[in-house]
Amino acid sequence: MTSRTELVRQAIKFQSPERIPVVYWNCDQTDGDVMLYHLGINRTDNDATVNEWGYRLETLDDGTMGHPTSAHLPDWTAVDDFSPPDLAEEERMAAAPAFFDECEDRYRLASYDLSGFTVFTLLRGYENSMTDFLIEPERSGRLMDMICDFECAQMDIAARHGFHGIHFADDWGTQSGLMISPGLWRELFKPRYKKQFAHAHSLGLDVWFHCCGNFIEIVEDFNEIGVDVLNISQPNVMDIDEVGRRLKGKQAFMMPISYQTVSIQGSVEEIHAEAERLFRLLATPQGGFIGYVEEYSSMGMSQENYRACGEAWARLSCG
């Protein structure tokens, strides 16, 4: 009998898995084939989460990770004296033994939760970040490289402890397009990602990359530089037909049923139909597709619709 880890790997590598792997992201993870371990170190301060990098996410509503209310490093004087967090491997991995026991034969995915340029924006503030690389290229480059190098050091820890993959979460799209021009992204960020992804692969880790928004202008770039599993987090704002024409059979995808539209407001039948549409456009008989389920009662998702999302993926097969 195929282990759930092997099932996921077969889907990623187009090796004909016997069924579609499914990820339950923020609850009920043991109902799925992948278990998520959070690498970040956070502490709670009143109604805020304070990350080890120092930025604060204020809890303004239930069920979300919180919102940044101010930049942690609003001026460059503070950045010049700034250092990365302590690797603190013992603390970072303290929950790993119990996590591995719960995993059983499931795929073990270590996650940064937030990574790369998203961390940069939380440190500098979004408005500053949109101009930093043009106005202060040396300083902003040093800060971005500091973040990337720290993430690579975390990868080393994850690999030593027996994880199978590393999960990046770095949003590049708005509802309608990229935050910056494709040319600038390719000049400034693509080489940094490529270096990180190559390091992950040298450690035997699969690369999973989450991106919100409409990033179709650079979707092929992620495939080119080594993303193994691409999570198009908002399929409702992407031209999935076009993504399929470009990357079907070349790129493995992890796909949700839109938690802005169908999974929130749709019927069970519409949820099943949307799962079938995404699968038809992006999967192949050999694999390349992982279903994604996230509980979003905070956005109005009913329990019936939450269950329907899991059922929708379970109804499909690769053959």
Image (cartoon, rainbow, N blue to C red):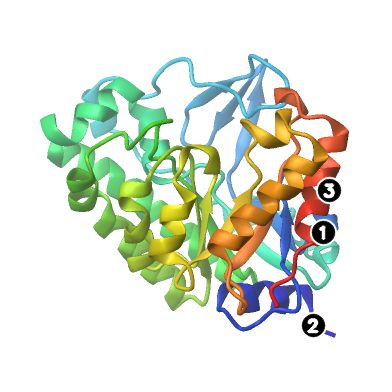
SS at mark 1 in the image? helix
Question: In the displayed structure, does residue 13 sit left or right of residue 308?
Answer: left
Sequence-first disc among 3 and 1: 3
Q: Which amino acid does label 2 sit on?
A: Thr
Question: Are there few (<14), some (14-19), or many (20+) residues within 10 Å of tag 3?
Answer: few
Please tell me in which quadrant of the rendered image residue 8 appears.
bottom right
Residue denoted by label 1: 98
Residue 102 at least partly seen:
yes
User: Residue 2, labelled with which disc?
Assistant: 2
Please tell me in which quadrant of the rendered image residue 46 appears.
top right
Front disc: 1 or 2: 2
Please give the name of the residue rendered at 25% of the width and 59% of the height, measured from the top-left corner: 191
Residue denoted by label 3: 28
User: Residue 53, labelled with which disc?
Assistant: none
Question: Are there few (<14), some (14-19), or many (20+) residues within 10 Å of tag 2?
Answer: few
Q: What residue type is labelled 1?
A: Ala
Determine the CA span between mark 3 and mark 2: 21 Å
Question: In the displayed structure, does residue 123 sit left or right of residue 77?
Answer: right
SS at mark 2 in the image? loop
